[in-house]
Image (cartoon, rainbow, N blue to C red):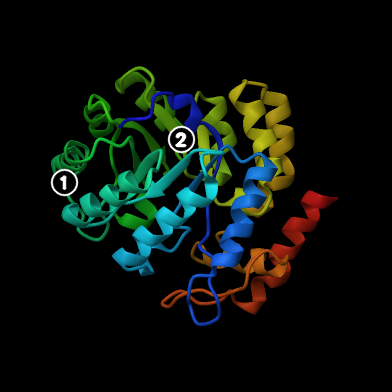
Amino acid sequence: MPINDKTMLTGSMVALVTPMLDDGAVDWTNLDNLIEFHIGSGTQAIVGVGTTGESATLDEAEHCELISYIVDKIAGRVPFIAGTGANSTSEAIRLTKCAEKAGSDAALLVTPYYNKPTQEGLYLHYKAVAEAISISQILYNVPGRTACDLLPETAARLSKIDNIIGIKEATGKITRVNELKNTCDTGFLLLSGDDATCTEFMLAGGDGVISVTANVVPMQMRKMCDAAIKQEQETALALNKPLEDLHKNLFCESNPIPVKWLLADIGLIHDGIRLPLTKLSAKYHETLRESIRQIQA
C-alpha cells in the first residue's frame, strides 16, 4: 500500500553502500553495523540496493535477499526505500514486488538505462509498474548515468498516479525544483540526488536528499538538511561549506568506488567491490582523506 505519511521520506536519506568482502560476497556483518550507524546518527531514511548499493552487479535473487534482510534489520525504526529500477519493465515489476512483499516503505525506480526510451516510453514504463504493485514509488532521474532524462512534463503526468509519490532528481539543475513544483501534483516529493547542489535544491523548496555523502558523515548531513528544509539559509550554507570538497571528491571516480574506499579507510567496512568496478586509484587516496580532515577541523 502507498505510504500514509510522505513527510517520513524527507530530509537526510542515505544511498547505502552494499558492503562486500574481498571476493565480492555481501558482508552481512558490516551491513548490520552500517544500518545501526545510520540509525544512531540521525539518518532519516535508508535507501538500499540502488546505484550506490551496486544494484547493477547483483542478480535478482541477491537483490531481493538484500531488500528483505535490510527491512528486517531496520525493524521499522526508520523508513526503508528499496531500489527496484531496471531497464526492463518486467524486471522492475518483479523487483518492486519483492520490495512490497518484504515490507519496504517505498521503492525507488531509476529510469531505464541504455535503452534510451522516449518520454512516452518512460511514462508507460512507470505507469505499468505502478499499476502492477501498490507500494509507494519514487521516480529516479539521473541522466548522467542512464543517458535518459525524465523531463518535468513527464514527471507531472506520472505524479497524478496515486502511488507515484515523488522524484529523486539528480541532474544538479536547481531550476528543476520550480519546474516540478509548478507542474506536478501538490505534495509530490522533490528529492535531490546530487550532493553538490542538494543544499540549494532544498533551499529552493526541495524536500530532502538521497545522499552518497551521508554514508560517511550522516550527522553533518542531517544537521544541514534540517536547516535547509526550515529555510534557514545562512545556517544551511554554513553547515554545507565544510562538506563541499567531500561532495565533489566522492565522485573522483565512478560512484560507489570512492565512497566504499573511504568507508573502508575509516574502518566501517571492508573494501570489497564487484567488477567491472575496481578499487579506488591510489592517486585519489590522500584527496579523500583531506576531505574528511576539513570536516573534522
Q: Check disc 1 and report its element: helix, strand or loop.
A: loop
Considering only order in the chain, which callout, 1 or 2, is on the residue closer to the N terminus? 1
Q: Is residue 144 above or below residue 5?
A: below
Q: Position of residue 225 (x, y in %)?
A: 62, 33
Q: How many marks?
A: 2
Q: Check disc 2 and report its element: helix, strand or loop.
A: strand
Q: Position of residue 292 (x, y in %)?
A: 75, 57
Q: Residue furthest bottom?
A: 23
Q: Which residue is mark 2?
A: 191
Q: Is residue 290 above or below residue 158?
A: below
Q: Which residue is mark 1?
A: 118
Amino acid carrying label 2: it is Leu
Residue at the image position 28 percent from the left and 54 percent from the top: 95
The 10 Å Cα crowd at callout 1, few under 14, some 14 to 19, many 20 or more, is few
> Is 269 left, or right, of 162 in this rendering?
right
> Is 286 left, or right, of 159 in this rendering?
right
Q: Position of residue 199 (x, y in %)?
A: 59, 35
Q: Quadrant of residue 3?
A: top left
